[in-house]
Image (cartoon, rainbow, N blue to C red):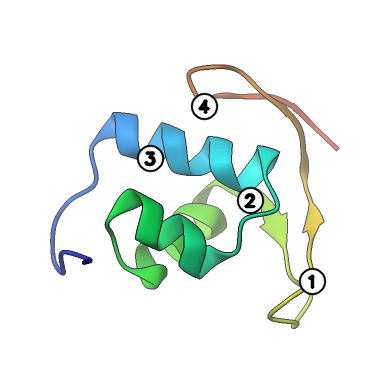
Amino acid sequence: MAHQGRVLSEHQVRRIVSLLASTDMTIPEIAERMGCSRSAIVSVNRHHGIRNYNGHRSTWTCSVTAVSQDGETVAKG
């Protein structure tokens, strides 16, 4: 279950960035896995510019071509 109002740790943010960049998991799937809200995942995505949804909910293009093991962006496309 998600915990509303909690601040995400740096480790959690790096893990979310990694999941957004390197998997085909949906935002709800990532939110469930990380135990946070969907809006938290969307916020991390917008801040780091990982996925571009172009106004669609189910399809996206990935703006990041590589993410290091600690979740840091290595190269952008």
Residue type of the residue flagged with mark 2: Gly
Asked if disc 4 and disc 3 are in contact, CB closer than 8 Å, the reply is yes
Disc on res. 71? 4
Residue 40 position, x and y percent, is 36, 62
Q: Position of residue 19 (x, y in %)?
A: 56, 42
The residue type indicated by label 4 comes to Gly
Q: Quadrant of the C terminus?
A: top right
User: Of marks 2 and 3, which one's residue comes earlier in the chain?
Assistant: 3
N-terminal of the pair, mark 4 or mark 2, is 2
Q: Nearer the viewer, mark 3 or mark 1?
A: 1
Q: Secondary structure at mark 4?
A: loop
Residue at the spot 78% in from the left edge and 50% down from the top edge: 62
Q: Mark 2: few, some, or many residues within 10 Å (few <14, many ≥20)?
A: some
- What residue did someone put label 3 on? 13
Which residue is under mark 1?
Answer: 59
* Circle 1/circle 4 CB separation < 8 Å: no
Query: Label 4: how many residues lie within 10 Å, few (<14), some (14-19) or many (20+)?
Result: many
Distance of label 4 from label 3 (alpha carbons): 8 Å
Q: Earlier in the sequence, mark 2 or mark 1?
A: 2
| CB under 8 Å between discs 4 and 2 | no
Residues at circles 2 and 3 in contact by the CB criterion of under 8 Å:
no
Q: Nearer the viewer, residue 25 or 39?
A: 25
- Amino acid type of disc 1? Thr
Q: Which mark is residue 49?
A: 2
Camera-side mark, 4 or 2: 4
The three-letter code of the residue at mark 3 reads Val
Q: Secondary structure at mark 2?
A: loop
> Which badge, 4 or 3, comes first in the chain's sequence?
3
Location of residue 66 in the rendering, given as x and y in whole percent from the top left corner: 74, 26
